[in-house]
Amino acid sequence: GGLALEDLPLFKGIPIHVFIAGRSIRDAASPVEAARQFKRSIAELWG
């Protein structure tokens, strides 16, 4: 856990299947928007 949106590019090129980003989403001002941002970033980095 403890993964921040800014950390995702550090893993680019590694065949990752799961990220645990609970606190980053739970503690966000808008958890729904934070989850959407994670989803967008993952799609951009891993297609």
Image (cartoon, rainbow, N blue to C red):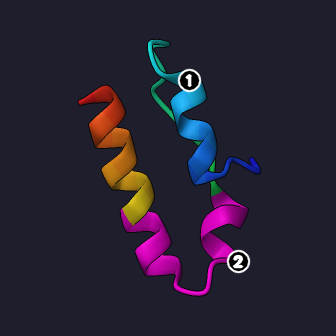
Identify whether 25 is placed above or below 42.
Answer: below
- Identify the residue at horizontal 49%, vertical 13% (top origin): 14
- Identify the residue at horizontal 53%, vertical 79% (top origin): 31
- Give the number of marks: 2
Identify whether 46 is placed above or below 2.
Answer: above
* Helix, strand or loop for disc 2: loop
Question: Which of marks 1 and 2 precedes in the sequence?
Answer: 1
**Which kind of residue does numbered mark 2 sit on?**
Asp
Identify whether 10 is placed above or below 15.
Answer: below
The reply, left or right, for residue 34 in relation to residue 26 is left
Residue 35 image-quadrant placement: bottom left
| Residue 21 spot, x, y in % from top left | 63, 53
Question: Badge 2: how crowded within 10 Å, few (<14), some, or many (20+)?
Answer: few
**Residue most toward the left?**
47
| Residue 20 spot, x, y in % from top left | 62, 46
Q: For residue 12: magenta? A: no
Q: Are marks 2 and 1 in contact (CB under 8 Å)?
A: no
**Which kind of residue does numbered mark 1 sit on?**
Phe
Question: Badge 1: how crowded within 10 Å, few (<14), some, or many (20+)?
Answer: few
Q: Which residue is mark 2?
A: 27
- Identify the residue at horizontal 31%, vertical 52% (top origin): 40
Predominant secondary structure in magenta? Answer: helix
The reply, left or right, for residue 40 in relation to residue 31 is left
Range of magenta residues: 22-36
**CA gap, disc 2 and disc 1:** 23 Å
- Quadrant where the C terminus is found in the figure: top left
- Identify the residue at horizontal 51%, vertical 34% (top origin): 18
The reply, left or right, for residue 18 in relation to residue 37 is right
Q: Which residue is mark 1?
A: 11
| Residue 25 spot, x, y in % from top left | 60, 68
**Residue most toward the right?**
2
